[in-house]
Every structure is written in structure tokens, then in C-alpha cells.
Image (tube, rainbow, N blue to C red):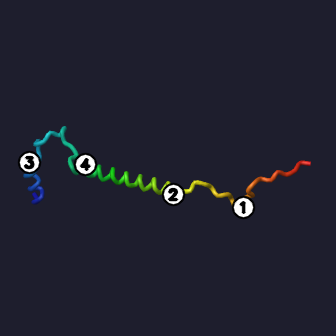
Amino acid sequence: MSATQAALTQLLPLAGDTFDKNKVTPGILGFLVFAALALGVWALMKSMNRHMGRVDFEEAPDPVAPATPTAKPTS
């Protein structure tokens, strides 16, 4: 038996049923990760709004096509 297996067999009884498995929560680390993700999404949305405000959606006329269609006279 190796040293790590011996250490594991000694620690397993300590990690037994000392807590209620139905009441385990993510804790402070889970909250901090969720808060960091929420803050990142908020910053990205704010940046996207700022960049979308700078976009000019007006289309420029096609330089090759005539500006107004000309009607041919019918005679």
C-alpha cells in the first residue's frame, strides 16, 4: 500500500456523514463566481449599447446604379 492510499484511508472516516448532504450550499465562492459573471455580462451589455449607438444604419446609394429610374417613352 502506497503512502497516498494510507493517508486516504485515514482521512475517509473524517469525511463521513458529518454534514447533511441535503443542506450543502455553494457558499461564498459560488456567490463570488456568480457575481463576477453577472458583472462581466453587465459590462459587456453596456459596451455593446455604446458601440451600437455609434453605428450609422443609413444606407448609402449604390454609385453604379442610377439614382432615379428613368421611364422609357412608349410610342
- Give the amino acid at mark 4: Phe
Residue sitting nearer the eye, 33 or 57? 57
The residue at the point 17 percent across, 40 percent down is 21
- Disc 3 and disc 2: Cα gap in Å? 60 Å
Question: Could you tell which of marks 4 and 1 lies nearer the N-terminus?
Answer: 4
Nearer the observer: mark 4 or 3; the answer is 4
The residue at the point 25 percent across, 51 percent down is 32
Nearer the observer: mark 1 or 2; the answer is 2
Question: Could you tell which of marks 1 and 3 lies nearer the N-terminus?
Answer: 3
Question: Could you tell which of marks 2 and 4 lies nearer the N-terminus?
Answer: 4
Q: Residues within 10 Å of mark 2 (few under 14, many from 20)?
A: few
- Disc 2 and disc 4: Cα gap in Å? 35 Å
Name the side, left or right, on which 75 lies relative to 31. right
Q: Measuring from the top left, give residue 10's x and y in whole percent.
A: 7, 52
Q: Name the residue under label 3.
A: 14
The residue at the point 41 percent across, 53 percent down is 46
Question: Could you tell which of marks 1 and 2 lies nearer the N-terminus?
Answer: 2
